[in-house]
Image (cartoon, helix red, strand yellow):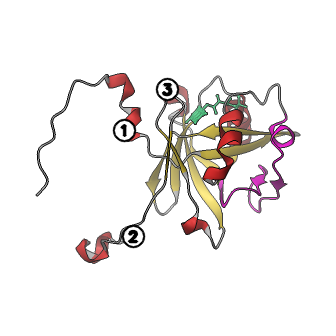
Amino acid sequence: MPQPIMKDDFPVSNVRHFLEPGPIVLVSSQWRQQTNIMTMGWHTVMAFSPSLIGCVIAAGNHSHELVRNSGECVINIPAASLVDRVVSIGNCSGSEVDKFKAFDLTPGKASKVGAPLIEECYASFECRLYDDAMIEPYNLFIFEVVKAHAAPSADNEESLHYRGMGEFLLSGNTIDRTALFKPSMLV
Ligand SMILES: Cc1cc2nc3c(=O)[nH]c(=O)nc-3n(C[C@H](O)[C@H](O)[C@H](O)COP(=O)(O)O)c2cc1C
């Protein structure tokens, strides 16, 4: 039987250490002739159909401007092997660096949005801005995924999950509890 676990006080500003969902993604964007990439951990699924994803893109980020102006982006999922590039992309600004060139990543043509896919990632979701009401108060962009691309190997890829303070968890084993679900909850 599970036993009660003793706990200490924990700083409320650090609960991200336990809650941050991941996987870490790379957001690619384009406005006019400029492309960019940023690293993002603060995203959440909000609805299945339409397929809505909420993403926090801080106002100080160059990507904020490109995504806000174009109303589009691509959410790309990098495998854990790209970790050094993922960190470096999240530690420099697209206002100073052409990140596709600097990090040797290949832009691919998306089918429904102007922003480029990142070909080295194992999944890419083309997104259009669905609701801008939360951008001003919270930098929260609510996107609809309008086209999704996933490699056949996607389920076997190791993803990165950020815990803050430079520390990443890697995705691990899969366990199946289908039998405990009501059929209506299996979506
Ligand atoms: C692991 C990691 C996770 C990050 N998550 C977010 C995030 O969820 N939202 C955000 O606004 N910035 C996040 N950042 C910071 C941006 O990636 C960073 O500010 C980046 O330089 C922005 O690039 P840009 O100015 O070219 O848009 C993260 C950075 C790292 C390294």
Which mark is on residue 137? 3
**Camera-side residue: 40 or 2?**
2
Q: Is residue 108 left or right of residue 59?
A: right
Q: Earlier in the sequence, mark 2 or mark 3?
A: 3
Amino acid carrying label 2: it is Val
Q: Position of residue 149 (x, y in %)?
A: 67, 65
Question: Looking at mark 2, is its residue's CB closer than 8 Å to ligand 1?
Answer: no
What range is drawn magenta here?
A: 98-126
Q: Nearer the viewer, residue 45 or 68?
A: 45
Q: Indicate which label's residue lies in the foreground, 1 or 2.
A: 1
Q: Which residue is mark 2?
A: 187
Dot 2: few (<14), some (14–19), or many (≥20) neighbours within 10 Å? Answer: few
Say which label, 1 or 2, has the lower sequence index. Answer: 1
Which image quadrant for residue 65? top right
Q: Residue at x 31, y 69 (%)?
A: 185
Q: Could you say whether the residue bearing mark 2 is in a helix, strand or loop?
A: loop
Q: CA distance from mark 3 to mark 1?
A: 25 Å
Which residue in the structure is indicated by mark 1? Answer: 18
**Does any portion of residue 75 appear in the rendered image?**
no
